[in-house]
Image (tube, grey):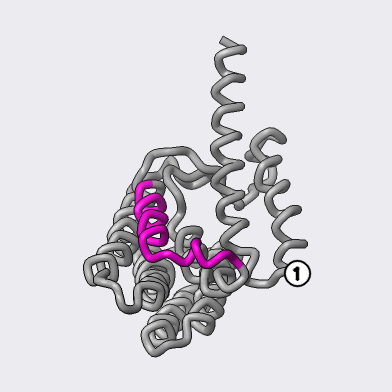
Amino acid sequence: MKKHIPNTITLLNLLAGFFAVVAALTGDPLLAGWLVVLASVFDFFDGFMARLLKAYSELGKQLDSLADLVSFGVAPAAVLYSLISRGGAGEDLSLLYLFAPALVVGASALRLARFNIDPSQESSFRGLPTPASGLFFATLPHLLPHLPPALHDPRLLSLTALLFALLMTSRIPLFSLKIKPGTSSFREMLPPILLLAIALPLLILFNLRAIPGIIILYIFMALVANLFNANTKKTES
């Protein structure tokens, strides 16, 4: 029976994503954000339990990607649709209503499919991980009320969706938060440890409002780490 435990947790991830879509489209994007965060917890524990129980399967791998597409692709896109439609009330933004969220869904699907067939991404990532993008958009409704009204503009939200879609489909290296003892050097372990050290106090102080900023910090730190590694390699050569 142990082989079914990770898949059951993955299905809970999927269900949390489904209810997040329902919440976003019925006028409760704040609840949708909480549900996507819950989905991310299930997403962490299904992999953790699979490793703990040695219950790996091709079915579990594919199921995990399908669940992630709903929870971190479709659900955040529904939240983004809600934000754009509210911010553009009275304006002719009908194309933006669907185009920007569709970008998020399409890029998420491509990113997940590429991850499944690329063995080089076991210890690091190529392109922004779909859960990171999903958490960013899903928790925006918790942050936007505390930001200037100019940042609520539907066009700015759409440009942000385009930027994240490009990041997801890019080949830019980004470090993984999964630290495997004995397989990583201190230099490789430092960025995720530093990010977690910063993120945990922010989450305690600001709750879900902190998540979009943490995702932006993650991207910034990864880009800086890439520049540092590139300069180090040039020096060594």
Q: Position of residue 32 (x, y in %)?
A: 48, 81
Q: Does the magenta run of residues contain 108?
A: no
Q: Position of residue 37 (x, y in %)?
A: 55, 73
Residue 87's image quarter?
bottom left
Looking at the image, the residue that sits furthest to the bottom is 26
Residue drawn where x is 35% and y is 47% of the image = 166
Residue 20, compared with residue 197, is above or below; it is: below
Residue drawn where x is 34% and y is 69% of the image = 66
Instruction: Tell whether 189 sits left or right of 36.
Output: right
Looking at the image, the residue that sits furthest to the front is 90
Mark 1 surroundings within 10 Å by alpha-carbon count, few (fewer than 14), some (14 through 19), many (20 or more): few
Q: From the viewer's side, name the closer residue of 7 and 18.
A: 18
Residue drawn where x is 41% and y is 53% of the image = 164
Residue 65, compared with residue 223, is above or below; it is: below
Instruction: Tell whether 14 sits left or right of 38.
Output: left
Q: Position of residue 130 (x, y in %)?
A: 43, 58
Residue 42, compared with residue 112, is above or below; it is: below
Q: From the viewer's side, name the closer residue of 30 and 232.
A: 30
Q: Does the magenta run of residues contain 158?
A: yes
Residue 45's image quarter?
bottom right
Residue carrying label 1: 204
Residue drawn where x is 39% and y is 63% of the image = 61
Number of marks in picture? 1
User: Which quarter of the rendered picture does the C terminus lie within?
Assistant: top right
Is residue 129 shown to the viewer in this render? yes
Amino acid bearing label 1? Ile
Give the residues in magenta: 147-166
Q: Position of residue 202 (x, y in %)?
A: 73, 62
Chief secondary structure of the magenta portion: helix
Is residue 67 shown to the viewer in this render? no
Q: From the viewer's side, name the closer residue of 160 and 49.
A: 160
- The kind of secondary structure element at disc 1 is helix
